Image (tube, grey):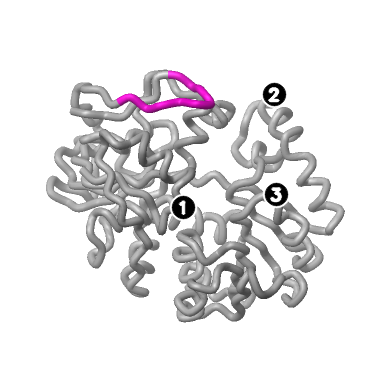
């Protein structure tokens, strides 16, 4: 089979498409014939070696973190899945491999794909959906009636996070571009701020939570709108000491990550807030809940119309970084 592999960590890394044997599933895995695999900023972080503290792969490694496909074989301990099932998954971080014609996946990381979505659109759901679900329920511990602001929430993350937040009983506020305003308002948000027309931090009543999708340039504004004791969750800033402790990392890793995140922690503490960072994990049971939300709300994630094959993987990575895609970039098999 063909697979896109990382041969060495490098700031200018390129993936290499090679012929390798079709993997054999263990007793707890399913073998999946891949139909589509989404390309994420996470691929670059892995390729440049940014995540080596969290997960240092033995190279070469087949990359790719989320996919949709058809079950071809099952291990003897596998429950709930059979040959022919149409599934999707955010692969476990320690065993990625979505950029390949076949992938083996631990069955607890798999769920049946939403019935209303094709393979290409299904592949765009797992990573974003699980990030939103775990962020709201685990990192924030959000409760019905509380409020959350999502700066930059008019994109693919907001498309999943908003209905999940509404399902949990939260009041949701979003900033984004004018083009997305109506579709986001139709999801039931309380307030929408067109970033070209309004500074949300000048008009928004204090909120319980902020989910950051923008980065450090927005940090001061995000802290400004939090209630005392509020919590800021970032998808893209820096891990901190709390993140390392939550993931039970050894002392030396905790110390290094604590130093890296100390500046943000200091700013958050000065603002009377708590800072958290999320790195989403695989979870098939949570993915089942996301499937139901997608089906009940008839969510169709935005997918960029540019068609990429596996041999185009480096073009797809470049397009994601520099091409202003109109939704998820997806490799079609």
Of the numbered discs in the image, which one, if any, rests on residue 216?
Answer: 3
Earlier sequence position, callout 3 versus callout 2: 3
Q: Is residue 97 left or right of residue 128?
A: left
Quarter of image, res 314:
top left
Q: Secondary structure at mark 2?
A: helix
Callout 1–callout 3 Cβ contact below 8 Å: no
Q: Secondary structure at mark 3?
A: helix
Quadrant position of the N terminus in the picture? top left
Q: Is residue 259 left or right of residue 83?
A: right
Task: Give the number of the mark in front: 3 or 2.
Answer: 3
Quadrant position of the C terminus in the picture? top left
Q: Secondary structure at mark 1?
A: loop
Q: CA distance from mark 1 to mark 3?
A: 20 Å
| Above or below 109: residue 292 | below
Earlier sequence position, callout 1 versus callout 2: 2
x and y, in percent, of residue 319 in the image: 41, 44
Q: Main secondary structure of the magenta part?
A: loop
Looking at the rendering, the stretch of residues picked out in magenta corresponds to: 8-16
Of the numbered discs in the image, which one, if any, rests on residue 252?
Answer: 2
Of the numbered discs in the image, which one, if any, rests on residue 311?
Answer: none
Badge 2: few (under 14), some or many (20 or more) residues near its Cα, within 10 Å?
Answer: few
Q: Nearer the viewer, residue 189 or 145?
A: 189
Quarter of image, res 107:
top left
Q: CA distance from mark 1 to mark 2?
A: 38 Å
x and y, in percent, of residue 168 in the image: 52, 71
* Residue under the image location 35 percent in, 56 percent down: 304
Label 1 sits on residue? 324
* Residue under the image location 55 percent in, 60 percent down: 137
* Residue under the image location 31 percent in, 56 percent down: 305
Callout 1–callout 2 Cβ contact below 8 Å: no
């Amino acid at each position: 089979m063909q697979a896109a592999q990382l041969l060495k960590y490098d700031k200018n890394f390129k993936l290499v498409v090679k012929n390798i044997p079709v993997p054999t599933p263990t007793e707890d895995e399913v073998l999946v014939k891949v139909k589509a695999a989404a390309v994420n900023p996470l691929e670059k972080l892995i390729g440049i070696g940014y995540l080596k503290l969290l997960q240092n792969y033995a190279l070469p490694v087949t990359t790719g973190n989320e996919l949709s496909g058809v079950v071809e074989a099952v291990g003897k301990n596998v429950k709930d899945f059979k040959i022919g099932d149409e599934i999707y998954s955010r692969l476990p971080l320690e065993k990625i491999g979505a950029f390949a014609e076949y992938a083996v996946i631990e069955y607890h990381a798999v769920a049946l794909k939403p019935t209303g979505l094709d393979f290409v659109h299904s592949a765009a759901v797992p990573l974003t959906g699980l990030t939103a679900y775990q962020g709201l329920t685990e990192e924030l511990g959000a409760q019905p009636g509380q409020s959350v602001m999502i700066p930059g929430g008019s994109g693919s993350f907001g498309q999943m996070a908003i209905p999940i937040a509404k399902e949990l009983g939260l009041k949701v506020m979003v900033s984004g571009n004018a083009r997305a305003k109506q579709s986001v308002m139709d999801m039931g948000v309380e307030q929408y701020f067109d970033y070209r027309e309004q500074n949300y931090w000048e008009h928004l009543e204090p909120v319980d939570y902020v989910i950051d999708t923008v980065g450090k340039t927005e940090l001061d504004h995000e802290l400004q709108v939090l209630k005392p004791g509020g919590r800021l969750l970032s998808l893209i800033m820096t891990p901190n000491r709390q993140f390392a402790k939550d993931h039970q990392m050894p002392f030396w890793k905790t110390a290094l990550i604590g130093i890296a995140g100390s500046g943000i922690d200091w700013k958050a503490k000065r603002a009377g807030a708590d800072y958290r960072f999320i790195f989403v994990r695989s979870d098939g049971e949570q993915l089942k809940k996301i499937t139901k939300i997608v089906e009940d709300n008839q969510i169709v994630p935005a997918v960029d119309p540019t068609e990429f094959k596996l041999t185009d993987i480096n073009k797809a990575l470049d397009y994601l970084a520099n091409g202003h895609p109109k939704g998820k970039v997806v490799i079609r098999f």
